[in-house]
Image (cartoon, rainbow, N blue to C red):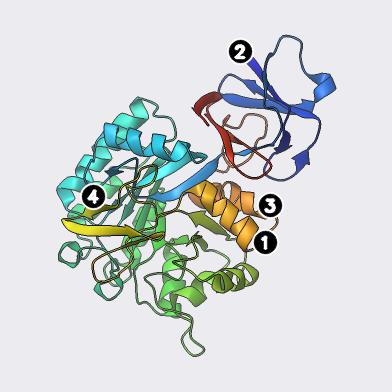
Amino acid sequence: MTLTAITGARIFDGETWHDDAVLLLDGARVQAIVPVREMPSNATVVEAEGGILVPGFIDLQVNGGGGVMLNDEPTVEGLRTICQAHARFGTTALLPTLITNTPDITRSVIAAGKDAVRQKLPGFAGLHLEGPHLSLARKGAHDPSLIRPMEESDLELLLECRDLFPAMMITVAPENVTEEQVSQLAAAGFIVSIGHTDSTFETVERYARAGARTVTHLFNAMSPLGHREPGVVGAALHSGNLHAGLIADGVHVHPAAMQIALRTKQGPGRIFIVTDAMSPIGTDLASFTLNGREILRRDGRLTLADGTLAGADIDMLASVRFLHQRLELPLEETLRMVSLHPAEAAGLVDRKGRLKPGFDGDFVLLSDALEMKSTWIGGKVVHQA
């Protein structure tokens, strides 16, 4: 393997900062972070020329990018376009997300995912199936004609995915999925996420005990926090067993609500950032279609004609800047929310989310002003600004 030394940047390993240090890569993996004076003489040196080097961003909810929606392009080439689009903004591992669709499209997406694994597609970490087993009352932009209960054939198809992907996530609503089905999915290694549901606090607690471990886009498309009925939001914040995704664009969730959630969340479960991005990311598209319905892109929002939010118009790097500059979160915690915390939620924490010996060589070089310099996946540059 070729030994590569990245030097000239301040390094954040996911937990602490390293000054006057070098990141050593042994091929696709991190070998160590060492002081500059200990840099091996046989290493190929890459000069970062200032700025910061941080763990690659991990996005567990990505509907599209680069002009492509996974719903419309359920192929390995569609997955490739989406991964490449988000690599431009520092995302080094993502779960392309299928929004509620037909069983045939679901099968096509799973087949494409298998091809992506065989081809070792850079950035592809697995799949997220958001629906179709959701609540009509909290459907959001999902097509109501495609929402339905989980049947035995659906469960069998999902269980066939056991061990196929590094991570496999599914968003479900208790209204259309049983606790026993959740238990079977969790036992098969699925990240079962509660979302698009009007469930009560007690119901979510039961489903968490059955095996659910995350909540999809906190505050959105779910029963709110009330003083007599805490709802899904209350369960997500109160339960230490649940992680929760959050869209940090200032549109889906008010900044004050974000700050309250961050102060309130019980651990060890964490709040992590998702983009919920759609096809316009990385393009100048003004509109696109989702299941035959036009989605409009205006003023940082994506909406149906009636104003219903339909995904988000934000990338991970913009999310980092929003959290750090608008919410004034410490940079260290901001970076953990887009790397370490999603790695923990997805069960990838043994090799992603930190820059430790043996971990994947996935990282981002940023300027001190948090502008993009380059993105690296598996020890290789995949995007250069």
Quarter occupied by residue 108: top left
Question: Which is nearer the N-term, disc 3 or disc 2?
Answer: 2
Indicate left or right for 144 with 227 as reference: left
Identified by mark 3, the residue type is Leu
Residue 353 % position (x, y): 59, 42
Q: Nearer the viewer, mark 3 or mark 2?
A: 3
| Pointer 1 local density, CA inside 10 Å: few below 14, some 14–19, many at least 20 | few
The residue indicated by pointer 3 is: 331
Q: For this rendering, which residue is in front, 317 or 210?
A: 317
Q: What separation in Å lies between label 4 and label 2 (alpha carbons)?
A: 44 Å
Q: Nearer the viewer, mark 4 or mark 1?
A: 1
Could you tell me which secondary element the residue under label 3 belongs to? helix
The residue indicated by pointer 2 is: 2
Could you tell me which secondary element the residue under label 1 belongs to? loop
Quarter occupied by residue 276: bottom left
Question: Which is nearer the N-term, disc 1 or disc 2?
Answer: 2
**Residue at the (40%, 34%) spot, across then down:** 84
Residue 320 % position (x, y): 58, 52
**Residue at the (34%, 66%) spot, across then down:** 309
Q: What separation in Å lies between label 4 and label 1 (alpha carbons)?
A: 46 Å
Question: Which is nearer the N-term, disc 4 or disc 2?
Answer: 2
The residue indicated by pointer 4 is: 156
The residue indicated by pointer 1 is: 328
